[in-house]
Amino acid sequence: MTVTIYVPRDSGALALGAEKVAKAIAEEIDKRKLDARIVRNGSRGLYWLEPMVEVETANGRIAYGPVGAKDAASLFDAGFLSGGAHPLSLGDPEKLPFLAKQTRLTFARVGIIDPVSLDDYRAHGGLAGLEKAVKLEPAAIVEQVTESGLRGRGGAGFPTGIKWKTVLDTPGEVKYIVCNADEGDSGTFSDRMIMEGDPFVLIEGMTIAAIAVGASKGYIYLRSEYPHAEKALNEALAAARKAGVLGTSVLGSHHAFDIEVRMGAGAYVCGEETSLLDSLEGKRGEVRAKPPLPAHKGLFGKPTVINNVISLASVPIILDKGATFYKDFGMGRSRGTIPIQIAGNAKYPGLFEAAFGLTLGEIVDEIGGGTANGRPVRAVQVGGPLGAYFPRALFDTPFDYEAFAAKDGLIGHAGVVVFDDTVDMLKQARFAMEFCAIESCGKCTPCRVGSVRGVETLDRIVRNIEPEKQVALVTDLCNTMKFGSLCALGGFTPYPVMSALKHFPEDFRPHPMQEAAE
């Protein structure tokens, strides 16, 4: 019987040598004339153990990691194919504490299946949601999604069902589904993991959305830094077309829908939905004034649903298991699960999918294990480069959209970046302003000019030039940017700056070394 060995094709694992590991294992199989095959799966998200190799045995899967190419021979010598004992043996991956504590709904198949095998996808519950959707009226699908409480997983947490209903109710012969896969926030990788590890779930979610609102064409706007995701998506799209999942008759129904992958050019602002639409249309990515909303006049002026990867990938399980099943997870108005991405100076960096409600302290200290270098955690930034910095005093904050907003923070794309006690928060505040200045599309004055003035003002604090006056000025600048910017780039840049000023004021006072230098 052929033994299956799983070696990740995920970008994170590839960066740590997974390609060399796969080659070394293949050479050992060939040299020893063994009956085994290699499947390139996605990552399970335990990045401190990557490349994590798994082998299918009579007793289930056994994991080994982190595996290097040099370890291949010793693995086989130790009876690797039957789950033999080895210093790198991790046992049943499902029993590893980091995985065992999770509630995997959206990521249920990631790291388990062959990402580009439609048969494998079906065998693990794939397409069950779409099979139900093709038998429902569009309004019934929208009602299910609305009832589930699903909210956008890429930014402000806008209710997905309301967005879909607006497009459904807007007349138009042509409508579009656009997936925002321009994942550009620091410390985020959940979109990439889905696209590389389970692309069919995104395709299924987009197709359900198309049936729900009456769209016939979909686009995945993918960031240019994700070539491996592009390859996986295009392989999966070809398989879906061949099997009749996409095309003129979705699963034999009267619905027609197809999807195309479009690559971005690296502009952070194109993660904002209207800038993304401009870029898709072949224009320079600039923020559009609202109204009109994209739901009314979006891509090429037609009604358009724009959702994040994780939002769309969460839809199939809602249609399959029902709205009540999904909304039973979570707290308050934050329903379902959220893929939390732990990065920065963390002992256990990776993806942890859980229901809303864990506290920030639980995420950082218990799940993330504190810092990698053992120093105390001083600050955590949640929500990308525009997210607020939270001190340990706020670690009792539940991971919930409203709870974070009440503390002047945002969950955003759920990236959690950990900093130890050596971080200089003045430098972090300056970075936020500089980032905005570089990435601004330039359309509105508060963002275009305010961010440049912000850098200049913070630089004067660094040089100890009337620091109190500069703090007052940067505070005024932040208020102008927050309330006057056209989009979230300028509007949210004040969050990291003001949170750094509020929670770490000592870093904005003159430093002895600076005074000596002066």
Image (cartoon, grey):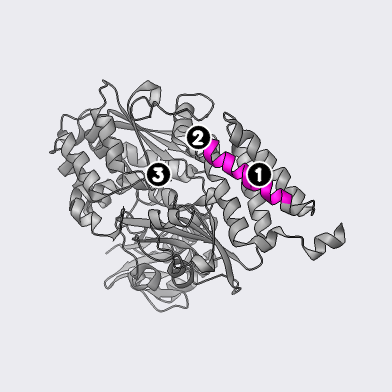
Q: Amino acid at mark 2?
A: Gly
Task: List x then y, in percent, for residue 351.
Answer: 43, 60
N-term mark: 3 or 1: 3
Instruction: State the SS at label 1.
Output: helix
User: What separation in Å lies between label 2 and label 1 (alpha carbons)?
Assistant: 22 Å
Local secondary structure at mark 2: loop
For the point 27% across and 29% down, the residue is 215
Q: Position of residue 25 (x, y in %)?
A: 45, 62
User: What secondary structure characterizes most of the magenta part?
Assistant: helix
Q: Which mark is residue 434?
A: 1
Instruction: Decide if residue 371 is on the left or right side of residue 132.
Output: right
- The residue range painted magenta reads 469-484
| First-in-chain label (2 vs 1) | 2
383 is higher (above) or lower (below) than 217: below
Pair 3/1: label in front: 1
The dot on residue 264 is 2
Quadrant into which the C terminus falls = bottom right
Q: Residue at x 33, y 59 (%)?
A: 112
> Which amino acid lies under the numbered mark 1 shown in the image of this protein?
Glu
Q: Which residue is mark 3?
A: 232
Q: Nearer the viewer, residue 497 or 196?
A: 497
Q: Position of residue 347 (x, y in %)?
A: 53, 69
Of the residues shown, which amino acid type is indicated by label 3?
Ala
Residue 66 spot, x, y in % from top left: 49, 68
111 drawn magenta:
no
Identified at 26% across, 64% down, the residue is 1
Which mark identifies residue 11? none
Foreground pick, 180 / 150 = 150
